[in-house]
Amino acid sequence: MARSVRALTLLLLAATATPALAQADTAPLDEEGASGDVIVVTAQKIEQRAVDVPITISAISGDQMRALGVSDLDELSNYIPGLNIQEQSANNPGIVIRGITSDSGSAQQAPRVTLYYNGTDISRSRGSYQAIYDVDRIEVIKGPQATLFGTASAVGAISIVSARPKPGFSSEVNASYGNFDAMTLGGFVNLGSDMVAGRVAFEWKKRDGYVRNLAAGQDDLYDQDQLGVRGSLRLTPTDRFTADLILTYDRQRNSGTPFISGTYPTASGPADPFGDAALGGSPLSESALGAAKLGLTRDVYDANLILDWQVADDWTITMVNAYRDFDSLEVFDADGSAAWYLEFAEDAKGWQYNHETRFSYNSDRFRGSFGWNAFIEDGSQAVPFSSEEGIFLQCLAGLVPGLPCIAADGSVAAAAATGILTGGLASAIPYSSTFGNIGKNQSYSVFADGTWMPSESLELTAGIRALIEKRRSGYYADVPGSVLTGGPSLIPGQVDTGGETFWSEDSFKAFLPRFNILYRFGDGINAFATVLKGRRSPTVNLSARPTATGPVPNVGRIAAENVWNYEVGLKVARGGFSGSLGVYYQKYDNFQVSVTQSDGTTITQSAGTASNLGVEAEARLAVTPWLTLFGNVGYIDGGIDDKAANGVFAGDRFRLQPEWQAAAGFTIDAPLGGGMRFFATPTITHRSKIFFEVPNNPLIAQDAVTLVNARAGVSFADKRFEIAGFIRNATDEDYLLDAGNTGGAFGIPTFIPAEPRLYGVQVVGRF
């Protein structure tokens, strides 16, 4: 009730605010690029200035990202209020918009946040994360956007738009070197005419791991070896027809994620999330888990064909066809110690096909679009497990009195358990099992969206998407019995499916509307209000349960998660100032949460009702032709409603949701004479405390974090060449990227340290 009252108060305040007040408040990085040019966005599937879009949007150009030193999506989120991106690994990103996380790896579960790449949905978690080199812009659209970006955009969308080929010749090469032996090499070559143009771009990154791993035969953790290559071809046979073919390959060969135990010591001393790790993995890793060492092997292939045809002065047809394929194997040590205890892998594979046809009409008084979309995906997630029975039982249950799992000197004392429990008949009993889930999902929808402009000052928008979904889930498990206990499995709760794959399916339909109002007070001063509905698809949870006659499917159907989003705001873009202020209130029913169970599986549960109240503001001010100030702030008061019906989740804040988030900085780009310029962009970012789990646990949390970053250098020959230095986390602050994880389900939470101070030098040449 209190949250609802605060929401109403803030909405009324924002609705009655004057344009003069809006100019005095802070606002975004989204109106102008580093050169001062206005960024044109396509959030509403037409080209518009961000100030004219009646929804909350933050857009950042490729030039701005370069100035900030941003080279990955997780770094970008430091500068966008209401956005947090946690890259636990490229295989396991957590994308958070307005406090709501989309990070499930299950092939059965739908994402909440649409990640768009050149106009198509790539939201499936294990195949979504990719490098962001040679980017034209990235748009972050907040609030449900089903009519524009499909059903996965239950809380918002991130749209990545790569640089397109253009007439003429241009090229760039850039390289950098930094601490931890970090090296990058990238660039592009563009060649073409008015009718045919091509562009090839690439980026290679390599870095040593920043977490020392004491385990013999294993690499240091969080090293990086990534390659991205993109080829683009643009055909423009007439000024009314454009065809874009974009082929992308993204590859990771990274070392293991540092799941560092908060319980077990190492040879370096007591457990320390920011100290050395001792992740030994499994001696049988190659045969049991698929790779000999901890780490990630991942390949993503993407093909995108966009056809844009202006069939008449007011009518355009756009067709988007895309295919994406990913194959990812990640081996990880879930207990965070040297023990052969909780050694897992995740083998995720899948493909997606997306087709959309959109008819667009644009006249002086009305613009709109309608069309259809088909989205088909086929994915799987297999989770192999490897352990030694005596070590597992000793570390889990302490069967041998006085024998610790890990001794004070970091040695694996539990390795003696099998010999003791068998009276010397065996010294080690290897154990392995696997379970997997499958998702074969189809979604077909039709949509319509229209904007009426009864006057030059007023725009009224309404849209709806009608959809039909078919979700088919599969589950299998190969779970041998335990030799030492004689039980049906080593991990409590795991059930063997007897060589079968169980299946269950269901169909769903929904109608998702949006309503927007934009009012122009004057040139570059706009107010807007929106009402949006979002929906996270139902989940067909499928596992197995034992019966007297053998295993049977265990089907759990979680109803759709629905959210209504109410928002008002102001946008300003006049002279050297641009800014926005928005207040939103979201109301959820059947809020879905992911919970890791004691058998290592993650299932979806309904936490009941939830609500979210927030304020976001961004500002950018060009003080002089060579000095620009910018800043933003976001506030969120959200979580699962504090009422008895919501059970153990009642009153919890959302996972990875800070109450406050802010960033500020300035950009200098000053002439020195003779074609030389000095440039610098120092920034400071702040994020308040976050919880890593629901139910919230104060021990599985990260207190407030403030980071200082900078990039500065000198350019020559009218910006054709530049040399720059960069630094991230300049104060070398220790903070956590994640905590709890799979080990937490077994009573031994693990902790992942975030990046330490990283610095280096970069050179760029443009031709």
Image (tube, rainbow, N blue to C red):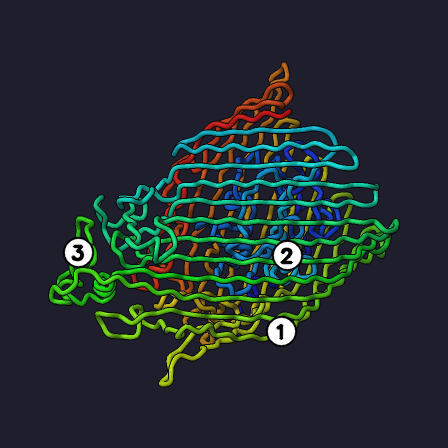
Between the C-alphas of marks 1 and 3, the distance is 53 Å
Percent x, y for residue 430? 26, 61
Please provide percent x and percent y for residue 60: 62, 42
Front-most of 344 and 679?
344
Quarter of the figure with residue 236: top right
Residue at 59 percent of width and 63 percent of height: 586
Label 1 residue SS:
strand
Q: Which mark is residue 413?
A: 3
Label of residue 508 in the image: 1
Q: CA distance from mark 2 to mark 1?
A: 39 Å
Identify which residue is drawn at 76% across, 59% down.
461
Looking at the image, the residue that sits furthest to the bottom is: 548
Q: From this viewpoint, is residue 33 visible?
A: yes
Side of 587 relative to 421 (left or right): right
Q: Is 712 located above or below residue 459 in the figure? A: above
The reply to whether callout 1 and callout 3 are in contact (CB within 8 Å) is no
Q: Earlier in the sequence, mark 1 or mark 3?
A: 3
Dot 2 corresponds to which residue?
Answer: 13
In front: 12, or 79?
79
What kind of element bears circle 3?
A: helix
**Mark 1 residue type:** Phe
Q: Earlier in the sequence, mark 2 or mark 1?
A: 2
Q: Answer left or right for 355 relative to 706.
A: right
